[in-house]
Amino acid sequence: MSTWDLLNKSDALTSEWIEKESILEDYIDRWLKGEVQKTDEEIQDLYDRATEQIDQLKAEARKAQEEYIKTVKEEAMRKSALISVKHNFGVSPDEFVITGGVLSSNAEDSHLIGRQKSTAELALEREQLLGEIRSRVMRKEMSLADASKLANDVNIAYGINMEQIQENTEGVMKR
């Protein structure tokens, strides 16, 4: 789901539970004024069922809000990581690979031909960037803290999350 879809879903659910809550309060007020003829047990049962529905709608709205916030944070982290990788290495996983083109004296006739990077190319590029970080640390051009941050940015920019990295390194002896 897109961020807008999540936001709209959250708003719709919030509006729905507020409306149901208002209807329930109005109905109880009318019962208290004697406009509605129901027994105490019937009103209690109605109140319990409506409250359960309202609580369920609140929970769904809260879940949609949390998912929206999580998605926005992930997008911001990826954007920041892409900027960091582009700044430090001059490459980006979103760049096209230029395969050809035509250069003409008439600008309208000039064009480039390109393609998206393949999964293998992205994996190789990521490994090369991580290797460059390692070599910068070995040459003492970069602190371990900076290297850790930059390695994290590379992994985020190339679509690798930290849970996958930890799963791949579990069981491996560390020196």
Image (cartoon, rainbow, N blue to C red):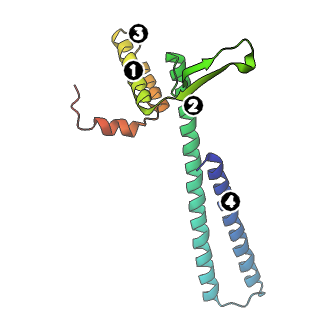
- Quadrant for residue 80, please give it: top right
- Residue 165: % across, % down: 36, 35
* Helix, strand or loop at mark 4: helix
Instruction: Please indicate whether residue 64 sits to the left or right of residue 31 in the image.
Output: left
Amino acid on which disc 4 is placed: Ala
Residue 102 or 129: which is nearer the viewer? 102
Q: Position of residue 128 (x, y in %)?
A: 39, 20
Q: Type of residue at label 1?
A: Gln
Choose mark 2 or mark 1, whichever is in front. Answer: 1
* Numbered circle sitting on residue 79: 2
Cα–Cα gap, marks 2 and 1: 21 Å
Whole-angstrom CA distance, mark 1 to mark 3, is 17 Å
Q: Are marks 1 and 3 in contact (CB under 8 Å)?
A: no
Do labels 2 and 3 touch, CB within 8 Å?
no
Callout 2, which amino acid?
Lys
Could you tell me the amino acid type at mark 3?
A: Glu
Disc 2 secondary structure class = helix
Along the line of sight, the residue nearer the viewer: 64 or 168: 168
Q: Which residue is mark 3?
A: 141
Instruction: Decide which of tag 2 and tag 3 comes sooner along the chain.
Output: 2
Q: Report which residue position mark 1 lands on.
A: 128
Q: Mark 4 highlights which residue?
A: 12
Estimate how packed mark 3 is, as few (under 14), some (14 to 19) or many (20 or more) residues with alpha carbons within 10 Å: few
Work out whether mark 4 precedes mark 2 in sequence or the reverse, and give the earlier one.
4
Classify the position of the C terminus by image quarter. top left
Residue 111 to residue 116: above or below: above
